[in-house]
Amino acid sequence: MSEVHAHPNYVKVWYWLVILLVISTLGPMLEIPAITLITAFGIAVIKALMVAANFMHLKFEKHIVWFLFIMSLTLLGVFFFGVAPDVMMTEGDQWIDCIADNSCVEQRL
């Protein structure tokens, strides 16, 4: 049998998401880089977890779902940071940085 659980108060969660949205948009207006990063990325992570927990009902799932969610995010990070050095490289034998030397503009015309 399935367990019955009470649904969260969606309006209350929505209010918190709106408050966090306002904070994350006001943060960059202070023009302090550390506060901008905290408000941009930190609050975005908190909002994503709130949406996943409440609207996707992960709060009520078994712990294996959270384990799989965290593992998939970890693998995403490993793949991203694993290829980032190659993507960010701007020099090499087989690499042409056409944006830096404006050669892409000539090829498009």
Image (cartoon, rainbow, N blue to C red):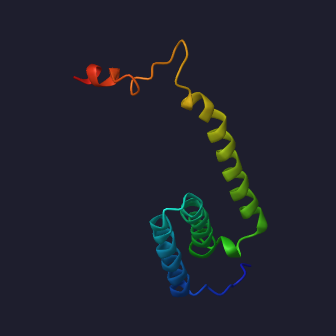
Foreground pick, 101 / 75: 101
Foreground pick, 70 / 102: 102
Image location (x, y in percent) of residue 65: 72, 63
Foreground pick, 99 / 45: 99
Image-quadrant location for residue 44: bottom right
Q: Which residue is the extreme one toward the top?
A: 93
Image-quadrant location for residue 89: top right
Quadrant assignment for the N terminus: bottom right
Residue at x-position 71% and y-position 49%: 74
Position of 106 with respect to 63 (left or right) is left
Position of 67 with respect to 41 (left or right) is right
Position of 60 with respect to 15 (left or right) is right
Residue at x-position 64% and y-position 46%: 76
Image location (x, y in percent) of residue 4: 69, 85
35 relative to 105, above or below: below
Quadrant assignment for the C terminus: top left
Image location (x, y in percent) of residue 60: 70, 76
Image-quadrant location for residue 85: top right
